[in-house]
Amino acid sequence: MPKDSCKTKGLYAFFGENPEEAHRQFFKPEPRMSRRGFFTGAGSVTAGSLLGMTVPFYANMPHGLVPAAFAAEDVLVGKDGLTLLNDRPINAETPAHLLDDAITPTARHFIRNNGLPPEDVDAEGWTLAVDGLVENPGMYSIDDLRSGFEVTTMALTIECGGNGRAFFDPPARGNQWTVGAVGCAEWTGVRLADVLKNAGVKPGVVYTAHYGADTHLSGKEDKQPISRGIPVAKAMTDTVLIAFAMNGGPLHRQNGAPLRLVVPGWPGSCSQKWLTRIQLRDVVHDGPKMTGTSYRVPRYPVAPGDKVPEEDLVIIERMPVKSLVTSPEHNSRAERKVEVRGHAWSGDRTVVAVDVTIDFGKTWMAAELDGPVNVGAWQNWRRTLSFPEAGYYEVWARATDSAGEMQPFAIDWNPKGYLNNTMHRVSLRVA
Ligand SMILES: Nc1nc2c(c(=O)[nH]1)N[C@H]1C(S)=C(S)[C@@H](COP(=O)(O)O)O[C@H]1N2
Ligand SMILES: [Mo]
């Protein structure tokens, strides 16, 4: 095991992989204090370097146990019931039954970090630079945005491009998201389009480039963890917000406080958090996670496990049609009659039907489906079901969008495990 695997993977993955070796390395009696304390020094991470003190009884600690001081609750302050997939960077998804609300509460919005969030952010002193191919490059404080442009509040769906990756076979590397890397919070801010019009978009602009204040996992200040962009045509649509409030309150620290982009219906990675700069370019952006295999899928269907040449990978734009069953809870007990409900969405489109089945797809029943509260919001659906007799059932939900696209039963495999929109299956034990 490389000595720094705890630094690059996070404590949980580090301990999970090889508990004996992790224990030996982590509780080394000689603490190596790093200058800045947390994970930043050279060499391996030890309990001593993290806690700033030794652990006198470390020899008694069962192997594989992560010190309670670093337990999930401490990493996920202000979050409620999220499942921690990784703590370096922090990645946490929301169990489907905790996404039951029409609007996702801040405490239940998932977290996907590629690097380390900025510390001690100051909303007062925050600035956003708008530059590149614009007539009037400028710097805006959050107050400038608030007073200079129309402020709007919208429910907007953010889904990570890798949501559902855990179900790929052969598996794809990356966060093993199941179904909960999605949320639809109410975001307040100004339209990116208005800010860009004010700056004056020069002819020939094709793409935006987004920059945030987070630091690369290596700790190197000059290295961006992620910097993505969108075609300027998308940037000029009126659902793309520069947001400074979430559900009527401040943004959660892990969700990009105090300022972020929200690009609904496109891979979450387009929605830059801790936003500090938007640059306009006459070429497609080439920042970290824009190139190579990142957020790209083959331009043609491939067989599971196939190697795909990089030139045949295309940048993901809209997210595909998908739905979620948020009640009843997966693997729960149910009465003979029960209301099932959830959400459905399809990037840049509306969902026109949600059907459910309790007989493994032999017969489908239409659910009652609401329209979106605004363009870019997911749609709520519900249906009362009666089970013919006691036993084990699965509820499957399948959404169809305005272009006639329907969720598949089987995964459309791709090398990096993106865009898994297979039907959500929820198991029920009916009494
Ligand atoms: N600055 C910055 N912005 C970022 C990220 C990041 O790591 N750094 N992660 C992106 C990814 S991959 C996703 S899916 C969304 C997740 O937003 P959330 O953490 O608020 O749920 O943020 C995006 N914006
Ligand atoms: Mo993501």
Image (cartoon, grey):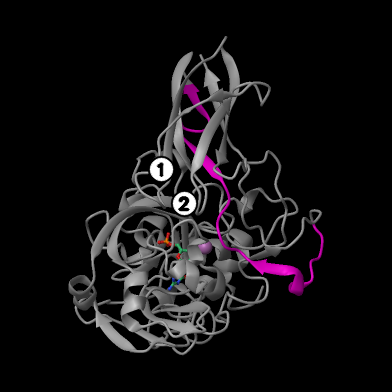
The residue identified by callout 2 is 182
Relative to 221, residue 393 above or below? above
Task: Classify residue 282 by image quadrant.
Answer: bottom right
Q: Position of residue 128 (x, y in %)?
A: 31, 81
Residue found at x 66% / y 26%? 361
Q: Where is residue 146 in the image (x, y as percent from the top left)?
A: 20, 71
Q: Ligand 1 appears in which quadrant? A: bottom left
Q: Position of residue 344 (x, y in %)?
A: 48, 41
Disc ID at residue 99:
1
Q: Which is nearer the eye, 276 or 254? A: 276
> How many badges with numbers are in the image?
2
Residue found at x 46% / y 32%? 329
Q: Can residue 375 be seen in this view?
A: yes
Q: Secondary structure beneath disc 1?
A: helix
Relative to 296, residue 177 above or below? above
Badge 1 or badge 2: first in the primary sequence: 1
Bounds of the magenta span?
305-333
Q: What residue type is labelled 2?
A: Val
Q: Which is nearer the eye, 327 or 11? A: 327
125 on left or right of 220: left
Q: Secondary structure beneath disc 2?
A: strand
Residue found at x 61% / y 41%? 404
Disc ID at residue 247:
none
Task: Give the crowd class for mark 1: few <14, some 14-19, many >=20 residues within 10 Å.
Answer: many
Residue found at x 41% / y 77%? 214
Task: Give the crowd class for mark 2: few <14, some 14-19, many >=20 residues within 10 Å.
Answer: many
Contact between marks 1 and 2 (CB within 8 A): the answer is yes
Q: What residue type is labelled 1?
A: Leu
